[in-house]
C-alpha cells in the first residue's frame, strides 16, 4: 500500500471538482493500398445487379463546396418523397457530426446522380452512421431507389463475401473474399474479411452470394495482406431502428460524448470488475459469452529484470519488451510496454478510450553517478502535454513523493479535459524511483478519454501494484 512521505495530499485522492475545470462543451486511418483482383463471374453478376444501391459519400466544406472526406454508403430503405436511408461509417462523416455548421453531405450514385443528405444517427462505438436523402420538393415526382436487404441468419465461417465501394475516387468496384470468423482480441465484435478494402470503400456494404448485407466495410491492416474488417450487420440494424424512431437534430457533440462515456465505462469495467482468484483485475466472462464479451483485460504483475511491476493481462491486451546493453552503453536498459486495444476514432485528431503503461528499468554498470542520474531525467509528467493540442485544455499537473513497498518514487499526475466532449479526460500517471543510485525504475500509465472517476480508480490500482 502506498504511504505519504510529505504533507501534500495524496494525488489520487484529490476531489474531481478541482480537476474538472476544463471547457465543457478502422483503425480508420488510411490503409496501405492493396490491388483488387479480377472479380469472378459470380462477383461480376452481383455487381451488375446491385451497383445502383451503393453511393459515394462526400463530406464537403460548406464555405468552398469542395470535398473534405470521402467514403461509401448503401441504401437500405426508400420512403418515396420523404427520402431514402443510407448506411455508412461514422468516421466518414465525423467532421460534419462535430462541426455541422462547417460541412454538408453530398451523395453520388453509380449513375452520377448527386443529392444532398442529412445525418440521422451515429454509433461511434461500432463506427456506423445513418443518413437520409433530402425530401423531394412538393409537386415533383420522387426518383425511386433500389435498396439492399439485410441478412438475418449468421454467416458461416468460410463463406464468400463481396465488399463494394468507391476506392480512391476511381469508380465503384467489388472485392471478393472469404469470411474468416469474428476477430479475436477486440472489445467489440468485428468480422475478419480476407479481401481487399481500399481508402474510399469505408462504409460500403459487404454482401453474401444472394446480395444480402452481412457487414459494413470499416478498416484494413496496414501491415498485412488481405486482412480487412467488417462491422456485423446486427449493429447496423440496431442503429437503423433507432434512426427510424428518432427525429432530425443539428447538434451531435452531446450524443457523441454520451457514447464515449459509455465506452470508457465498459473499458473500465473490464479492469475493475470482480476477478478470478489469483488474477487481480481480470474479468471472468459469463458462460456462453460471445467472443467480444469474453475478451478479457485486467491488471496483473510480472517481472522486469527480476523486479515485479504492474502490467496488463488478458486477451484484449498486448505487451512488448526490449532490452539495451553493451560495452559502449555502460548501463543496461529494459523496457516493457503494454496496451489495452480499445480506442475509438472520434475525429482525425482524437482517439479515446485507450490505456497504456510502460516501465523502464535502468541499471548502472560503469557510468559516473551524474551521468546515470541524468538518464531520462526530463519532466516525468511531460508526456501528457504532447498529444491532442487544441482539442484538450492545458495539462494541470501535481506531483508528490510516495513510498511503494520499500522504494520511494516521485509521482506526477497530469489531467487534461476534452474541449468538445464534456466529462472526458486524458489522465497520465508517471512514477520515477528516487532512492537508488545504481538502479532506477520509471513507470507510467496513460489513459485517454476516461471519466475522472474511472481514471482515478484505474490509476490507484496501478500505483498500489507498484513496488
Image (cartoon, rainbow, N blue to C red):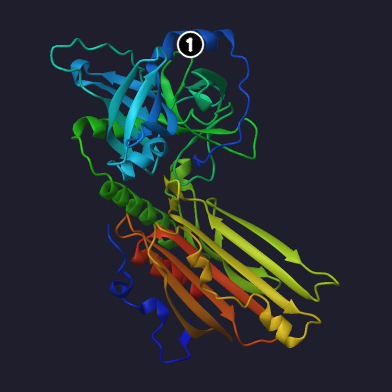
Q: From this viewpoint, is residue 78 visible?
A: yes
Please say whether residue 238 is visible from this viewpoint. no
Residue at left offset 54%, top offset 69%: 444
Q: Choose between 460 and 141: the one closer to the eye.
A: 141
Q: Out of 211 and 394, give the one closest to the viewer.
A: 394
Which x, y percent locates residue 2? 48, 82
Residue at mark 1:
46
Location of residue 361 in the rendering, given as x and y in whole percent from the top left corner: 67, 73
Percent position (x, y) of residue 234?
37, 31
Image quadrant containing the C terminus: bottom right
- Asked if residue 430 is positioned above or below residue 111 in the image, the reply reads below
At numbered mark 1, what does the secondary structure look like: helix, strand or loop?
helix
* Residue located 39% across and 57% down the image: 391
In the rendered structure, the answer to whether residue 136 lies left or right of residue 415 reads left
- Judge from the rendering whether residue 283 lies leftward or rightward of residue 13; answer left or right: right
393 vs 206, nearest the viewer: 393
Q: Quadrant of residue 372?
A: bottom right
Residue farthest along the right direction in this orientation: 327
- Tell me which corner region of the image, top left, top right, bottom left or bottom right, holds residue 24: bottom left
Q: Nearer the viewer, residue 58 or 231?
A: 58
Amino acid at each position: 500500500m502506498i504511504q505519504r512521505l510529505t504533507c501534500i495530499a495524496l494525488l489520487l485522492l484529490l476531489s474531481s471538482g478541482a480537476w474538472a475545470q476544463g471547457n465543457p462543451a478502422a483503425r480508420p486511418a488510411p490503409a496501405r493500398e492493396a490491388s483488387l483482383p479480377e472479380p469472378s463471374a459470380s462477383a461480376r453478376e452481383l455487381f451488375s445487379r446491385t451497383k445502383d444501391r451503393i453511393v459515394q459519400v462526400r463530406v464537403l466544406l460548406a464555405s468552398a463546396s469542395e470535398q473534405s472526406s470521402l467514403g461509401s454508403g448503401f441504401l437500405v430503405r426508400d420512403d418515396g418523397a420523404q427520402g431514402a436511408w443510407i448506411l455508412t461509417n461514422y468516421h466518414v462523416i465525423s467532421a460534419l457530426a462535430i462541426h455541422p455548421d462547417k460541412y454538408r453531405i453530398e451523395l453520388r450514385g453509380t449513375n452520377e446522380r448527386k443529392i444532398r443528405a442529412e445525418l440521422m444517427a451515429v454509433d461511434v462505438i461500432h463506427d456506423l452512421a445513418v443518413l437520409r436523402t433530402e425530401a423531394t420538393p412538393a409537386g415533383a415526382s420522387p426518383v425511386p431507389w433500389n435498396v439492399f436487404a439485410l441478412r438475418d441468419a449468421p454467416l458461416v465461417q468460410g463463406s464468400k463475401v463481396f465488399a463494394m465501394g468507391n476506392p480512391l475516387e476511381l469508380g465503384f468496384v467489388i472485392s471478393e473474399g472469404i469470411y474468416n470468423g469474428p476477430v479475436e482480441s477486440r472489445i467489440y465484435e468485428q468480422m475478419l474479411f480476407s479481401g481487399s478494402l481500399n481508402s474510399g470503400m469505408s462504409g460500403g456494404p459487404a454482401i453474401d452470394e444472394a446480395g444480402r448485407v452481412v457487414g459494413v466495410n470499416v478498416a484494413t491492416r496496414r501491415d498485412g495482406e488481405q486482412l480487412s474488417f467488417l462491422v456485423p450487420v446486427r449493429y447496423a440494424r440496431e442503429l437503423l431502428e433507432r434512426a427510424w424512431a428518432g427525429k432530425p437534430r443539428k447538434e451531435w457533440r452531446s450524443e457523441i460524448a454520451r457514447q464515449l462515456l459509455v465506452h470508457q465505462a465498459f473499458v473500465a469495467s473490464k479492469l475493475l470488475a470482480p476477478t478470478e482468484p489469483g488474477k487481480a483485475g481480470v474479468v471472468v466472462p459469463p458462460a456462453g459469452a460471445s467472443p467480444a464479451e469474453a475478451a478479457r483485460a485486467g491488471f496483473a504483475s510480472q517481472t522486469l529484470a527480476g523486479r515485479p511491476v504492474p502490467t496488463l493481462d488478458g486477451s484484449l491486451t498486448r505487451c512488448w519488451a526490449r532490452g539495451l546493453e553493451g560495452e559502449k552503453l555502460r548501463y543496461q536498459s529494459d523496457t516493457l510496454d503494454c496496451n489495452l486495444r480499445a480506442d475509438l476514432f472520434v475525429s482525425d485528431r482524437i482517439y479515446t478510450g485507450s490505456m497504456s503503461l510502460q516501465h523502464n528499468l535502468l541499471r548502472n554498470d560503469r557510468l559516473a553517478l551524474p551521468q546515470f542520474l541524468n538518464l531520462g531525467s526530463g519532466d516525468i509528467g511531460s508526456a501528457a502535454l504532447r498529444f491532442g493540442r487544441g482539442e484538450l485544455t492545458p495539462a494541470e499537473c501535481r506531483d508528490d513523493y510516495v513510498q511503494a513497498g520499500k522504494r520511494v518514487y516521485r509521482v506526477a499526475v497530469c489531467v487534461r479535459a476534452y474541449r468538445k466532449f464534456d466529462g472526458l479526460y486524458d489522465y497520465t500517471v508517471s512514477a520515477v524511483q528516487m532512492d537508488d543510485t545504481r538502479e532506477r525504475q520509471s513507470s507510467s500509465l496513460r489513459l485517454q478519454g476516461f471519466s475522472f472517476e474511472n481514471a482515478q480508480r484505474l490509476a490507484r490500482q496501478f500505483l498500489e501494484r507498484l513496488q
